[in-house]
Structures are given as structure tokens and as C-alpha cells.
Image (cartoon, helix red, strand yellow):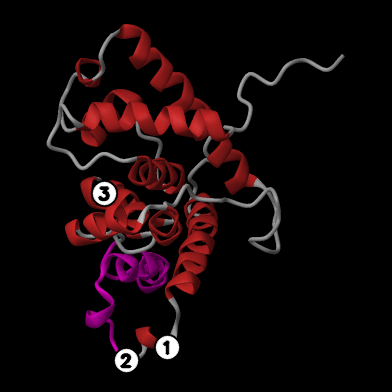
Amino acid sequence: MPPKNPNPTLNENDIATLADLIDEAATRTEEPLSLEGLDGFITALQCAPRPIAEADYFPVLFGQPDPAALFANAAEYQRFQALFTRRWKEIARALSAPIDSLTDPHALSPLIMDWEGMLNDMPMQEAAAVEAEGVPLYASIWAAGFLQVVEHWEDDWTLPPDSKDEAFADELLDPFYVLMTPPEEWTDEEQQTSREDYVALAIWSCYELCEFWRDRGQAPRQ
């Protein structure tokens, strides 16, 4: 019998549990925590120019030096850490997999909320109330989580001004910034591409960023 995988892929129940834990922690901090943002945050850490220690990135994610204090008890925080680690490993496996298409079952698949589908499943009155409060743009929260890492550790991501690679690195980040920008502010050129295609471009950028930093001497993520 093959050994049991210590970091199996998250199933629907695991994802729901992780989302609930994040939502609960969000009630105790001013940081805009969400499962989708967390997923973008983890993905950016995997694509970063250098490894960032947990002791450094958790305070940034949660907006305070003691993340455990945001959870109801130690058991919940440990449950969060276990699910976080499994998702971390899952993203790492996806980004290290040799793929030719994003339809490949091994390809990176971000945990992006389908707000439109959720609203369609709600009673009409409830959906109208949610829409009145404002519904995030598709994948904007994932992109925001990713860029939180890029901008917090900006010095790591900034190449020398005379680097021939600076424009290339900026181009790889462009899809994330577009996803965070309201569509009415998109340029004429940006409007030629659909939002779903920008998500695909952002995912491909994750693969290219990993390869880019490795080519510059950065070891791949574990």
C-alpha cells in the first residue's frame, strides 16, 4: 500500500472550512481577509524573488504580529495552519508542474469566488441586497492578494533601473493590476481582452515569474 499523502489536495469541505476560519479571523482585524485574497497571497509568495518566512508573512497577511489572537482558540488556529500548509503545497505542486494548457488537471487553479453564480443561486431579494452593497469584480480580490505581497516586499521585486529584464517583469505583473482596475478605467487596448482572459494571463504570469526568478539564481519553492 502506498504511503498516505500528508498534504492531499483540498476538497470542497476543506475549502469551506478554510473560508470559514478566514472569515472568522476577519471579524477581529481591519485587514480585508478572504479565502480568495489568501489564495492570491500564497501564490505570490510562491512566485517571489526569495523565500519569505512564515514569521514575516503572517503578520502582513493578518495585519498584526500575533495572528493566533484572531482565532477563537488554539485548535482553530492550528486547523487554519494545517489547511494553509496544504494549500501552499498544492499551489507549489501546480507551479512546478510542466503544463501546456491551463485545462491540464495539474495546472494552477486559483480559488476565485464566482459572485455571479452565487447571486444567481440566491433568492431575488437577498441577491439584490448583496448587489446593493457592492460585489467585487471577478478575480479582483485574488489579484489584490497577489499584489499585496509584491508591494509589501517591493524592494525584492524591483530590478535595477538599467536592467534589460525590468520591462519584462513589469509586463508579467500587468494582468494583476488590470484585474484590480474598474473596467471603465481600462484603456482602449485593455478593453480588447476579456476579464477571463486577463485571469488566464495572470496565471501564466505566475509560471513565468517562477521561471524568471529561478533563471536569475532563485531556488524554486518547496
Q: Amino acid at mark 2?
A: Asp
Q: Which residue is the site of mark 2?
A: 188
Whether residues under marks 1 and 2 lie with C-beta atoms below 8 angstroms apart, the answer is: yes
Q: Amino acid at mark 3?
A: Gln
Where residue 198 sits in the image (x, y, percent)?
A: 44, 71
Of badges 1 and 3, the one in the foreground is 1
Where residue 202 sits in the image (x, y, percent)?
A: 46, 63
Q: Is residue 220 visible?
A: no
Bounds of the magenta segment: 160-187
Q: Which residue is the site of mark 3?
A: 148
Whether residues under marks 1 and 3 lie with C-beta atoms below 8 angstroms apart, the answer is: no
Q: At 52% across and 40% down in the image, what residue appears?
A: 219
The C terminus sits in image quarter: top right
The image quarter containing residue 99 is bottom right
Magenta highlight on residue 173: yes
In the image, 108: left or right of 151? right
Query: Rounded to the nearest whole Å, what is the CA distance between mark 1 and mark 3?
Result: 27 Å
Q: At 39% across and 34% down in the image, what residue appears?
A: 19
Q: Main secondary structure of the magenta part?
A: helix
The residue most toward the bottom is 188
Rate crowding at label 2 as few (under 14), some (14 to 19) or many (20 or more) other CA atoms within 10 Å: few
Of badges 3 and 2, the one in the foreground is 2
The residue most toward the left is 30
Q: Which residue is the site of mark 1?
A: 192
| First-in-chain label (3 vs 2) | 3
In the image, 116: left or right of 220? left
In front here: 26 or 147? 26
The N terminus sits in image quarter: top right
Rate crowding at label 1 as few (under 14), some (14 to 19) or many (20 or more) other CA atoms within 10 Å: few
In front here: 156 or 35? 35
**Local SS, label 2:** loop
Query: Rounded to the nearest whole Å, what is the CA distance between mark 3 and mark 2?
Result: 27 Å
